[in-house]
Image (tube, rainbow, N blue to C red):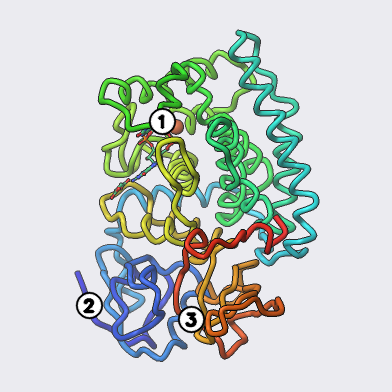
Amino acid sequence: MLKKIKVKDVRLGMYIQEVCGSWMQHPFWKRSFKLTDEKDLNTLKNCGVDEIWIDTSLGLGVSADVKTLSKKGEELKVESELKKIDKTPQKTTALVSLQTELFAAKKIHTNAKKAVVSIFKDVRMGNALQLDGAVSLVNEIIQSIARNSSALICLSRLKNADDYTYLHSIAVCVLMVALGRQLGLKDAELQQAGIAGLLHDIGKIFIPDEVLNKPGKLTDEEFNIVKMHPLKGWEFLKESSEVHDFILDVCRHHHERMDGMGYPDKLSGEALTVFARMGAVCDVYDAITSNRSYKQGWEPAESIRKMAEWKNGHFDEVIFHAFVKTVGIYPTGTLLKLKSGRLGVVTDQSKKSLTKPIVKVFFSTRSIAQIVQEIIDLSKSQDSITNIENPLQWGFDLNEIMGV
Ligand code: C2E
Ligand code: SIN
Ligand code: FE
């Protein structure tokens, strides 16, 4: 049931349907979500709005004795699965700067590419799966993400069409680790999550290259062939003794959807594990932000916004919300136009607000000229975001500006 309540009465566990008046200008915040984070609660209480709508069928009601328990089954499942996990508190703040971490991250990324190429090559030749290299690699990825998650996430976006499957596997690995960390998974699970990312598309080995790399849209028949990759990958991995159930699950179920419209098993809601739900979000985000032989990738901020707007039940909302916290509403690498007329690229996320990242300004649209580069923390600045810009339209090489 929908209820309008005073913001002062809001508490954790409520399902926020709508915030009345202008809260944060960003559409993401205009969506409904379950309030589970103390920080979001504080932001909400201090944002100058005094009333909101809650949905008591999806979250807690107004008074403490109204214990609602008609929460959505699938949310309950995610929460109870996450509860079972012995979480370790994680620092979400970057311990080192992006520039510093990029040195280490570039090496890790190069090694990752070698490792993935060699795993895929071995499998193609019919050799047994060897995961020793992958385990130590994922451990390095876990540490890099802990120091500064933006470095590997940014590097993972750089792809060329030919190597897409390898580079996509690394990107999904990196995103799974970062998301898992946000969800509070401990290292042993992060390791499984990372390896699951590396291996999720291994079944693409069994799909003919001319179909996979077709430079245009697939026919129905071709798409049906591609759709066999989760099952083919799973059949292969389940023969290998060292592959954990989580990994098998992500391989088989990363194309399932919460509404049951995915493949190969058309699982829905409760039948999907946390790991499979994580895989679906990370896979799609990386696929749509990548340039492909058949289509130009979208900018990260645009991709997040689109995924948030797909209301037809593709993703788990709790997991997606955690993902947005992981990469940001304006992910690192996003080109922004500020009220001052300056252009800046996001170089870090703010500890304070998802909508006020840290940017490096480098160009003035008023004087149409480069300006002295400067780092600005928008949570502490008078300046603010007016627009997300397309770097292709401006012709800037953002990676060069960021030092990627
Ligand atoms: P992929 O390219 O790695 O994409 C993974 C998933 O990301 C897709 O699964 C889909 O859920 C999402 N995705 C990717 N691009 C888009 C997009 O433009 N819009 C939306 N809404 N979602 C997108 P899906 O659709 O099951 O595709 C599985 C695989 O089939 C893809 O993996 C890709 O290898 C291949 N594929 C799909 N469509 C095409 C196509 O038009 N041409 C070619 N050559 N391959 C395609
Ligand atoms: C999806 O929900 O996965 C796709 C929806 C869309 O492309 O609009
Ligand atoms: Fe896939």
Amino acid type for the residue under numbered disc 2: Lys
**Label 2, label 1: how many angstroms apart (C-alpha)?**
51 Å
Give the camera-side residue of 244 and 193.
193
Observer-side mark, 2 or 1, equals: 1
Label 1: which secondary element = loop
**Which residue is farthest top?**
126
In the drawing, does residue 217 fall left or right of residue 360?
left
Observer-side mark, 3 or 2, equals: 3
* Residue highlighted by disc 1: 215
* Residue highlighted by disc 2: 3
Q: In this view, does 83 lie above or below 126?
A: below
Give the camera-side residue of 320 and 41.
320
Instruction: Give the percent coordinates (x, y) of residue 19.
Output: 32, 79
Res 43 label: 3
Which quarter of the rendered picture does the N terminus lie within? bottom left
| The residue at label 3 has a CB less than 8 Å from ligand 2 | no
- Among the two numbered marks 1 and 3 on one chain, the one whose residue lies closer to the N terminus: 3
In the drawing, does residue 233 fall left or right of residue 130?
left
**Which residue is farthest left?**
1
Q: Are marks 1 and 3 in contact (CB under 8 Å)?
A: no
**Label 1, label 3: how many angstroms apart (C-alpha)?**
46 Å
Q: How crowded is mark 3: few (under 14 residues within 10 Å), some or many (20 or more)?
A: some
Amino acid type for the residue under numbered disc 3: Thr
Which quarter of the rendered picture does the C terminus lie within? bottom right
